[in-house]
Image: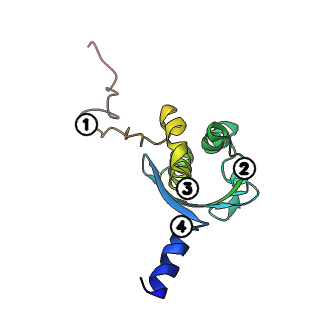
Amino acid sequence: MTQTAQETEARATKRTEFIATGKRKNSIARVRLAPGGGVITVNGKPSDEYFTRPTLQIAVAKPFDITGTLGKFDVRVNVAGGGIAGQAGAVRHGIARALTAMNPDLRKPLKAEGLLTRDAREKERRKVGRRKARKRPQYSKR
């Protein structure tokens, strides 16, 4: 091997930042995971400021709770598309994927909780003659 190939291989084994993509509904989250003090930044804001609902904050931190790595990694996320709940699901999915990229041993507990599976549920399309996907117009007997 040449000197540059050895350096490249050494750099690959000592990666400090792990990148993953998470998806949910129409949201896509690009997650960067690096060792640090546990700061989660979403679109330039702290996660508790971006996701104001407590349930969403819990959902975002769930992969860390399951793996016991809460407070050990800094997370930077760019998330786009969809609503706030879909974005939180995408961030959660991305964090879980990044944790498995960092340590393959964490795959089993994350998989058991269903955090590595992309939630495939999408909004159902509106049908002709209906108000929404399934809601019918009010019935009139006469």
Residue farthest along the left direction in this orientation? 128
Q: CA distance from mark 3 to mark 1?
A: 45 Å
- Look at 42% across and 51% down and name the residue there: 26
Q: Which mark is residue 127?
A: 1
Look at mark 3 in the image and give the residue it sits on: 102
Depicted 10 relative to depicted 63: above or below: below
Q: Is residue 138 left or right of residue 62?
A: left
Residue type at the position of mark 3: Met
Q: Is residue 22 left or right of residue 68?
A: left
Look at mark 4 in the image and give the residue it sits on: 13
Q: Which mark is residue 48?
A: 2
Q: Earlier in the sequence, mark 4 or mark 2?
A: 4
- Look at 57% across and 46% down and name the residue there: 88
| Quadrant that contains the N terminus | bottom left
Q: Residues within 10 Å of mark 3 (few under 14, many from 20)?
A: some
Tag 4, which secondary structure? helix
Cβ–Cβ under 8 Å for marks 2 and 3: no
Q: Earlier in the sequence, mark 3 or mark 1?
A: 3
- Look at 56% across and 46% down and name the residue there: 92
Q: Earlier in the sequence, mark 1 or mark 4?
A: 4
**Front residue of 29 and 112:** 112
Tag 1, which secondary structure? loop
Q: Earlier in the sequence, mark 3 or mark 4?
A: 4
Q: Which mark is residue 39?
A: none
Tag 3, which secondary structure? helix
Q: Residues within 10 Å of mark 4 (few under 14, many from 20)?
A: few
Work out whether residue 7 can be spotted. Answer: yes
Q: CA distance from mark 1 to mark 2?
A: 38 Å
Of tags 3 and 4, the one toward the viewer is: 4
Depicted 13 relative to depicted 64: above or below: below
Relative image position of residue 74 (x, y in whole percent): 69, 59
Relative image position of residue 2 (x, y in whole percent): 43, 86
